[in-house]
Amino acid sequence: MAAVAQPGATTVVQQSAGGNPWAGPPEGENVFGMITQNVSRLTEAKPPRAWYVAFAIALALLTMFGLSLAYLFYTGIGVWGNMVPVAWCFDIVNFVFWVGIGHAGTLISAILYLLRQDWRTAINRAAEAMTIFAVVCAAIFPGIHIGRPWLPYWMFPIPNQMGMWPQFRSPLEWDVFAVGTYATVSLLFWYMGMIPDFATFRDRSTTKIRRIAYGIVAMGWRGSSRQWHRYERAYLLLAALATPLVLSVHSVVSFDFATSQLPGWHTTIFPPYFVAGAIFGGFAMVVTLLVPARQFFGLKYIITLRHIELMTKVILGTGMLVGYAYGMEFFIAWYSGSLYEGFTFINRLFGPYAWAYWTMIFCNVVAPQIFWSRKMRRNVWVAFAVGVIVNVGMWFERFVIIGTSLARDFLPSSWGYYVPTPTDYTTLGGSFGLFFTLFLLFCRYLPTVAMAEVKAIMPEAHVQHGHGGAH
Amino acid sequence: MAKKDSDSEHDAPHGGHEDHGGDSTAAVTDDVRLPGAARVAQIAGGVGVVGVLATIGLGVSAGDDLRSFSFAYLTAYVYGLSIALGALVWVTLQHLFAARWSVVVRRVGELFAASTPVMALLALPILVPVLMGNHQLYEWVDHAAVEKDHILHHKHAYLNETFFAVRLVVYFVFWAWLGRYWLTKSVEQDRTKAKGLHAKLYGVSAPSMIALALTLSFAAIDLIMSLDARWFSTIFGVYYFSGAVVAWHSLFALVLFWLQGQGKLVKSVSVHHFHDIGKMMFAFTVFWAYIAFSQYMLIWYANVPEETVWYQERTNGPWQNVAWFLVVGHFVVPFLFLLSRHVKRNRAGLKLGAVWLLFVHWVDMFWLVKPSLGRHGELHGLPIGVMDVTAVVGVLGMLLAAAAWNARDKNLIPLEDERLAKSLAFTNS
């Protein structure tokens, strides 16, 4: 439930709040007007200093990303720490990490919609945007991982004079389709949801450029009841179609590993375990982004403590699912009686990468336990801190799975120890630059909150409002 | 758009607490007592006892050291247990998610969730032979085999008679306590009209769900997966869970239809509630298929002999048809059938879907358990017989009797639950 300040409360204080034109309570004659004003002012008023500072940092990181990639393309993938036997590491770890982050958006917009969780309306737009940007970040890594950046189109089944096709039996190829479908549907979902809000921006615009720009993307939306009817039908259909995608994408990503015979990779629980982990990491990223956003960009009237609390509950719950998978893997590694399975897990605990394993356990299993306390769930900065910790943990989870399993497999003679190079770190750090740059631009130019949807769940929007009775 | 029903949480300045969508003293005009419950319990219990005794009688007289009996009985047992655990999971989740739509039907769920003690009793025909060293069912009970086999020897620390029994006791003590707790607290509220109970139950539900997930998974490993003691799969507990949820919602719908046929809950439980139960049946049918596919595909693709052997047994000979039947009958058909909104909101349609899913879930259990009967290659044809029928009748009869017995002195609706008005007014547009 979105909570905008009480109608009739003081609406004079705005522009003044600490010199931040985005903060301060929203103004408007009624609750609907206040929502519109609260969201629209982010694109209409000049951003606060916090936005410029954040944007400068993000741009700097993005530049670092660009330079890392340029260096990579100029020199070749030898600039990474990848070696034999660890032929996949940061490139694939980062890919899985970013794809995972992208899961919260569709979960919130599709599954929570089907489950009638109205509270999602305050956060779904930002989460969907985050999904798109995370998928953009993710898509870069397989592209650069192939080492021939001029040939990534070979991943697609394009008829060609060489009669050459991708290997359809490879899960890596299924990934291309799974992530491609996911990106397409998420983009459609995101865009379609924004159309009514674009129309609001268009109608409020005071400059010609804004009128034309938002007018084009609003696609002639007039808000007629017929348009709304079509819109809601389309939304329901897209939600139903997107729901299996929430499960399929990370399941297919898990197939990349689980179809192999490598101990630590080949285990049947991987698909649901990866999906749970993706939702876990995705929600942690939503919290990480929205806590500062609501604080600095004046969205705390719409994204309330209740939303933060509910998200922390999802983090706690999915963290438990991930913990279940860790535990079950361990038990079965022993139960199987397989020498290699058993060794892999002992090696994770006490081997050369034990530090990574225990980091993962602390971040993903121990840290979220703080959310058993309601007080902690409602403390935004605790939520933010745990969100960051969980993101670190989920990155380490992929590192543990990919790196440690490869470093020590069947034959001790072929064991190795992977050490990342500075380029590995700058590429990873730089990808955050791309992500944050896109997200900050989104905050500045697009409707950060689904205004129309938030309004639709306000008590005032209901027929029975004020009559108190059930229907 | 989302349900046009205002939310009622603490931070919403508009409306504050539960004052939208009805006032909190709900007007249930239905008949919520089931005076015939004791009679139902007697009949179902009588049929159940006869079924179980007949199975035991047939099993003993088969003269195969209880071999055919054990497998037939275990099939029926894990089938019945999945339904009882499905109910327990369902009730726990309603509290955990603070669900409002389901309040009006929750008591019926609680009656089944509190029926696990009878499943403990029914575990005896499995447990007693194991404790007496009968190894027809579980190879790991055979000490000679365990000594010869490196893998079985390795697992002996876990797979041995004493620890098996201890684990079953632990599971059942927890399940019985939890089921009883949900029912007692809820019934108590009917009487005391205490406010704020849901906050307390919510607090219990979260740790309970963790314990439930673990006990259910390990029960599946102990009872079913260990039939082929060399085989292992990390997803196995989730597989059993997914089937349990499907089976529970199916039986749930049928029980509610039956109650309405008796003139109970006619006005309170509407097509909207049935629609939601149908959605759960549909969703978990898909989830079951997802889990089943994940397990099969990963084992097939990696092609490691120690894992494929399990599917080798289950996809060859007479089992090939059963496996294909599950693909079509447990996924394709119910998926296409229950996809339709019309079917889920139609009494005959949902009934048909529920009966079908209960049947295919039994086939699934049959396909999990029975192929292990042929692990020494002595199997010819599909091992199905009279005992399979009597065992299912026995177990289901006892389960229904336990639920009906629980119902005999209780309301069928938690009349004092503060969310009841929301549930009565619930629409599924």
Image (cartoon, grey):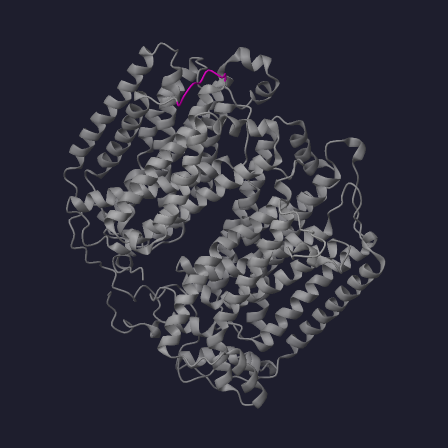
Q: Work out which quarter of the rendered image holds the C terminus of chain A and state it.
A: bottom left
Q: Image quadrant of residue A406?
A: top right
**Residue A237 screen position, x and y as percent:** 42, 62
- Taking the view exactly as shown, the residue that stands out farthest to the front is A161
Q: For residue A336, say whether it is visible.
A: no
Magenta part of the protein: which range?
B376-382
Q: For residue B50, say whether it is visible.
A: yes
Q: Nearer the viewer, residue B368 or B70?
A: B368
Residue drawn at x 15%, y 47% as measured from the top left: B263
Q: Image quadrant of residue B121?
A: top left
**Residue B169 screen position, x and y as percent:** 41, 26
In screen coordinates, is B229 left or right of A385?
A: left
Relative to A253, does residue A63 appear above or below in the rendering? below
Q: Work out which quarter of the rendered image holds the N terminus of chain A and state it.
A: bottom left
Q: Nearer the viewer, residue B427 or B133?
A: B427
Residue drawn at x 76%, y 43% as measured from the top left: A86
Q: Nearer the viewer, residue B64 or A180?
A: A180
**Residue B144 screen position, x and y as percent:** 54, 10
In screen coordinates, is B202 left or right of B43?
A: right
- Taking the view exactly as shown, the residue that stands out farthest to the right is A75
**Would residue A329 be counted in the magenta stretch?**
no
**Residue A283 screen position, x and y as percent:** 55, 58
Q: Image quadrant of residue A152?
A: bottom right
